[in-house]
Every structure is written in C-alpha cells, then in structure tokens.
Image (tube, rainbow, N blue to C red):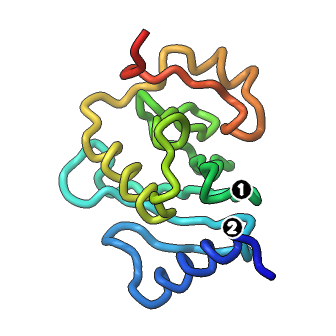
Amino acid sequence: MASISSRRLAKELAEIHSEGCPVGINLVKADDFTCWWFTIEVMGESLYQGDKFTLQFRFDPQYPISSPAVQFVVTEGRQAPIHPHVYSNGHICASILGNEWSPVLSVVAVCVTLQSMLASCKDKQRPVDNDRYVRHAPDNPKKTQFHYDDDTV
C-alpha cells in the first residue's frame, strides 16, 4: 500500500504532466517522491526580469502534513536571488514553508508564491544576518527556526 505522501506526490506530478505549470514555472526533474527541481522566472517587469532560478523540493514521508524542504539551488555559476528573504546558500525565509504551511498547498502553489515574492521585491539585498546564518546553517532549511516579520509577540 502506498503512503499518503507518495499518493499525494503522484497526484501532483500527474496534474503537472497533464495541465502543465503556470507561466514562468517549469518542472526540470522529479526523482520519484524524494526530490523535485523546478525553474522559476518572474514574468513582466521586475528587478529579476530575465533571471531564471532553480528550486529544489525535498519531501519527507510526512508530506503533505509537513512542508517540503525548499531552497534555491546554488552551484558554481548559479546563485540564489538577491532578496531580503533569501540567504546566499539558497535557504528561504517564508512563512508558508514554516509556521503557515498547510497540507492544502501544493508544490506548484509554493512555486507561484515564491515567484510572486520575487516579483514584488523592491530592493535587491540579502537578509541582514546572511553571513552569520550561512556560516552556521544546517543542510536542511527545515531545521532552522526562522523569525517571520509578521510574527506577533
């Protein structure tokens, strides 16, 4: 019997193959139900016009109850977008990947949200604690307790 995670991912992948992705989002590769890669590009006028970034999604057996580990792929010659919520190692500080994750969100919905986050950016800059965070960051961004600006005290 297939797990809830693998059934859900199989459904999402089938929808991507049959319906396609929104404009500017493309599935590059899906390694079964463990790791998927997408490219995202901001459409229209923005600070990132003409830039294309690669996102990596890693799924644990608790998906969709728990969020996927999502980060921008950083390799030689490819950097994460310079954005106030994106660290130079590709980790993303976004509440939908943390305390506001909901099982109703899909992989494509996360891509659209991150595409929108880039499109609405007014100032290309790294998070203020980028250097310190990157020095001590875990491999898996889900192991980080991010503080979201909209958190209430």
- The C terminus, quarter of image: top left
Please name the amino acid that badge 2 sits on. Ser
Task: Note whether 79 is above or below 89 in the view shown.
Answer: below
Is disc 1 placed on a helix, strand or loop? loop
Task: Note whether 37 is above or below 72 in the view shown.
Answer: below
- Judging by the rendered image, the residue that carries numbered circle 2 is 5
Q: Residue at x 56, y 44 (%)?
A: 79
Residue 36: percent from left, percent from top:
64, 67
Please say if the residues under marks 1 and 2 sit with CB atoms less than 8 Å apart.
yes
Number of dots carrying numbers:
2
Please name the amino acid that badge 1 sits on. Gln
User: For this rendering, which residue is in front, 133 or 1?
Assistant: 1
Q: Residue at x 57, y 21 (%)?
A: 130
Q: Residue 10: name its quadrant.
A: bottom right
Is 109 left, or right, of 119 in this rendering?
right
Neighbour tally class for label 1: few under 14, some 14-19, many 20 plus, Cα within 10 Å: few
Q: Residue at x 39, y 15 (%)?
A: 152
Can residue 100 be spotted in the picture?
A: yes
Residue 55: percent from left, percent from top:
56, 56
- Judging by the rendered image, the residue that carries numbered circle 1 is 62
